[in-house]
Amino acid sequence: MHASDIKSVELTSYRLRDVAVQWYETVELSRGTNASPAVWEEFSVVLLRHYLPVGIRQARVDRFLALKQGNMSVREYSLQFDSLARYAPSIVAERSDPVHRFVVGLGPHLINECFTAALLDSMDISRIQAYAQNLEDRKRQQYENRDKGQCKKSRSARQPEDFPDDPMSPYPVESVRQLQKPYYEGSVYSESGEGSRIFGFQKRRDSAQMRPPRPRCSQCYRAHSGQCRQGSNVCYTCGDPSHYMRECPMNDKSGMVQPTRSITVSSSSVRPQERGPQASAGRGRGKSGASSSGGSHNRIYA
């Protein structure tokens, strides 16, 4: 306002409120009635001595020297920096002093880029604060976009059992429960027993895979345990010579399915056995005397 030292004191006195008005009137009365009007330098010294003692000012200088961004945003850090810098005029006397002090207190995610920007000759405290604010906003946007992408990937990789009762889930609860069932217990099988048969087959197949494989017989080239009965006139199930395999009473007890048809296999897949006329009736030949035509093929049951 280009006011003189005397007018400055008068204008400031009109801005005082509450107890400050009473304090100012007390100071004017203490100066006497014939005293000359107070000038600005005298008034500011008395005002600061009363409302801002030296100990408080020194404490705020220490706060300014130890100020770091920490968990504050750049905007909050800038406000505290400007509020405390005026208590240390000798520390920020030069133009580059507040810029360096501000950059030193920034967080590690901003300090490198701001140190490079502070090397410019035209950089002052207001510009470096605006640059740090824009840099922080850009980095925050990048982090948010990356987090959104990771959340989308994690949601797509979640299994149905992770959100069966979630009301915000895009999948119906019944559909999620159907997805939780194994493939052999799915809804494609009716309740008449198809699903249970597939389930039993799955269990038998898993148990069969866990058992060690049987050694292959050197006589019939099949995998079985015990003595090989191929070529002998005995039952292949129990070893009794009084009957054949199809008439064996052990079939009903063991739950084995009786063969209903024969399969002719060429000599290239099953090696023929050299047997005499007494051993011509092998397994599945029926009664004695019923031999195959020509005797060039073996008849076996699957």
Image: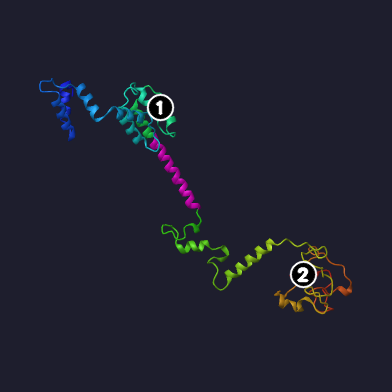
Residue 190 magenta:
no
Its colouring scheme is rainbow
Quarter of the image holding residue 110? top left
Quarter of the image holding residue 72? top left
Rate crowding at label 2 as few (under 14), some (14 to 19) or many (20 or more) other CA atoms within 10 Å.
Answer: few
Any mark on residue 264, and which? 2
Q: Check the image and report above or below for 290 versus 143.
A: below
Residue 58: percent from left, percent from top: 32, 27
Quarter of the image holding residue 146? top left
Give the magenta-colored segment's residue range.
135-157
Give me the C-alpha separation between circle 2 and circle 1. Answer: 91 Å
Q: Main secondary structure of the magenta part?
A: helix
Rate crowding at label 1 as few (under 14), some (14 to 19) or many (20 or more) other CA atoms within 10 Å.
Answer: some
Q: Work out which quarter of the rendered image holds the C terminus and state it.
A: bottom right
Give me the residue at 16% from left, 32% from top. Answer: 22
Residue named by callout 1: 117
